[in-house]
Amino acid sequence: MDKFDSIRAFTQVVASGGFAAAARKIGLSRSAVNKLVIGLENELGVQLLHRSTRRVSATATGLAFYDRCVEILASLEAAERAVMQMHEEPQGKLRVNAPMSFGTMHLAPALADFLVQYPALEVQLTLNDRFIDPIEEGFDLTVRISKLQESASLIAHQLVPAQRVLCAAPTYLKNHGIPTHPNELRDHSCLHYGQVAAEDRWTLIGPDGEHAIAVRGVLCSNNGEVLKDAAIRGLGITLLPTFIVGKELQQGKLQTVLSDYHPPEIFIYAIYPVNRHLSIKIQLLVDFLKERFSQPERFFS
């Protein structure tokens, strides 16, 4: 007995409400469907169906087994589709979400190159700096920059560390002095990320341990490029990822301070719902982004 054939017969009987209707949908005789279900019951040692001359219904055990069988068959069909798609040109739409600065500076050019490589695909890119629920809002793939939070409904692939540095314009440091310890940041104008209230406290780890410093300055914003531009104009010290300030650091428009101290490590992740894990489109995009952002120079040009 082929177990998958038996499971398909059983689920179709439950879904159709009878052997005759299930047989028509499967394309087998009524007796063949009945034989498959009886064989499954015998193998499991349980009764899955209540049978009468008028109707067929699932037992309590049968209902529980039916729910699991539907999941198994759906996964099997998805796997079969994925294997077949591997030999076809990927096509269709991908809905992608990402933070604003990373999206405009790095992800958008990467997606353009991706689409050149796979011209039958379409990407709908949405950029914002709020925390979104990928499943509720219907995104196929989300780029997130944070500490990883485990989720049973989401799969996360680490793309690259998001290195963050403290930096300021040379003019600001000339006028206000260069801090030599995190405690001195309390006396400086600190341009901080302002969407989350807790972000007015910077955590820095160094040779003498961890420091949580309450900071304030003339500007806070929920966008890193706004903070970068303010820092370049000499308005204060800011804490930003190198994917935002890397070019300015190389050009000397900004310079790092307190280089012996660093914030807690965070990463750039590609996240997608569990039910998309067999999608060839998503796998191709994740692999492309991993390769793209494994090259650090991408963040400094």
Image: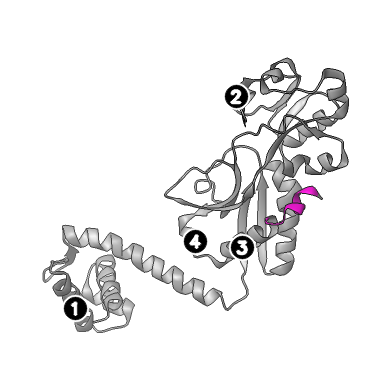
Dot 4 and dot 3 residues touching (CB under 8 Å): no
Q: How dense is the environment of label 2, judged by Cα within 10 Å: few (below 14), some, or many (20 and up)?
A: some
* Percent x, y of residue 129: 65, 38
Of mark 4 and mark 2, the one earlier in the sequence is: 2
Describe residue 120's horizontal placement relative to residue 131 as left or right: right
Provide the major secondary structure of the magenta segment. Answer: helix
Q: Name the residue tied to disc 4.
A: 277
Q: Which residue is mark 1?
A: 34
Q: Amino acid at mark 3?
A: Asp
Amino acid type of the residue that numbered disc 1 sits on in the rendered structure: Asn
Q: Circle 4: is it few (<14), some (14-19), or many (20+) Cα within 10 Å?
A: some
Q: Which mark is residue 287?
A: 3
Residue 295 lies in the magenta-colored region: yes
> Mark 4 to mark 3: distance in Å?
13 Å
Q: Of tags 1 and 3, which is closer to the observer? A: 3
Secondary element at image label 2? strand
Front position in the image: 64 or 298: 298
Q: Is residue 269 above or below residue 172?
A: below
N-terminal of the pair, mark 4 or mark 1, is 1
N-terminal label among 2 and 1? 1
Sequence-earlier tag: 3 or 2: 2
Check disc 4 and report its element: helix, strand or loop.
loop
Is residue 289 on the magenta stretch? Answer: no
Calculate the distance from the C-alpha at mark 1 to the C-alpha at mark 3.
Answer: 46 Å
Marks 2/1: CA distance? 70 Å
Asked whether, in this view, residue 57 is left or right of residue 221, the answer is: left
